[in-house]
């Protein structure tokens, strides 16, 4: 008779931690979501002695044209500065590191995966991640990208970023992009 009791005890001890973890996770999910709005300017610089976006690779038979500094199939690694205002000398509020690839054959369109880390203010050290298509040429006045996660205060965040091109140099590819980000988080 002891064997069934020991077996039952073993099962309970195995299941109890899972139940406690599930209860903690459920409590986390039941907390009301907080909405956070962020606004900053991303400076993506391909030209000069110290670019923030660097060419990594390009598909075969694709050479840049004078009016197309980011031709189809070009892959760039980035470490872009985020500032409070559109001027480069504005207060630095973070940086964005990641990759983007030119995915538009006929118009400038990018697919980007970037980590946006804030280095100032109440969210210092926290970051959110954007992985989305950015149809630059199709919607120069504004476009929407998906926020797919984050870390720190933005752990498990979801939301969207509305982008507007503040400045774009078609010869160099240098750009200043205004980001208005809405994040939902627990």
Image (cartoon, rainbow, N blue to C red):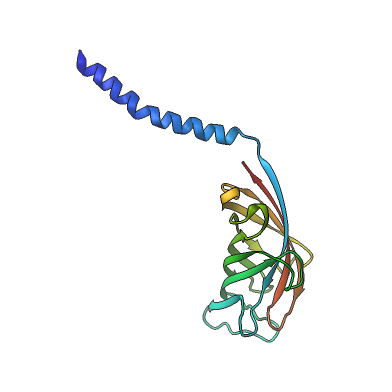
Quadrant position of residue 42: bottom right
Quadrant position of residue 83: bottom right
Q: Residue furthest right?
A: 141
Front in this rendered view, residue 21 or 111: 21
Q: Residue at x 61, y 85 (%)?
A: 49
Task: Please indicate whether residue 54 sits to the left or right of residue 11 in the image.
Answer: right
Front in this rendered view, residue 32 or 159: 32
Quadrant position of residue 93: bottom right
Whether residue 102 appears in this view of the structure is no
Locate the N terminus and report the quarter of the image it occupies.
top left
Q: Residue at x 49, y 30 (%)?
A: 23
Question: Could you say where residue 131 lies in the image, as x and y percent from the top left?
Answer: 59, 59
Q: Residue at x 58, y 56 (%)?
A: 125
Question: Could you say where residue 38 lies in the image, as x and y percent from the top left?
Answer: 71, 55
Whether residue 85 appears in this view of the structure is yes
Q: Residue at x 39, y 27 (%)?
A: 16
Question: Could you say where residue 75 lies in the image, as x and y percent from the top left?
Answer: 55, 74
Locate the C terminus and report the quarter of the image it occupies.
top right
């Amino acid at each position: 008779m002891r064997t069934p009791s020991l077996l039952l005890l073993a099962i309970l001890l195995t299941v109890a931690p899972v139940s406690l973890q599930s209860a903690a996770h459920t409590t986390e999910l039941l907390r009301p979501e907080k909405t956070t709005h962020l606004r900053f300017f991303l400076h993506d610089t391909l030209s000069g002695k110290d670019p923030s976006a660097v060419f990594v690779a390009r598909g075969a038979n694709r050479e840049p044209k004078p009016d197309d500094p980011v031709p189809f199939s070009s892959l760039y690694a980035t470490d872009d500065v985020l500032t409070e205002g559109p001027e480069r000398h504005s207060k630095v509020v973070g940086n964005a590191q990641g990759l983007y690839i030119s995915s538009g054959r006929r118009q400038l369109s990018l697919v980007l995966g970037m980590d946006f880390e804030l280095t100032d203010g109440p969210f210092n050290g926290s970051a959110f991640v954007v992985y989305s298509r950015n149809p630059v040429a199709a919607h120069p006045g504004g476009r929407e990208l998906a926020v797919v996660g984050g870390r720190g205060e933005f752990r498990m965040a979801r939301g969207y970023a509305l982008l507007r091109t503040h400045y774009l140099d078609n010869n160099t590819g240098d750009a200043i992009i205004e980001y208005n980000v809405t994040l939902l988080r627990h």
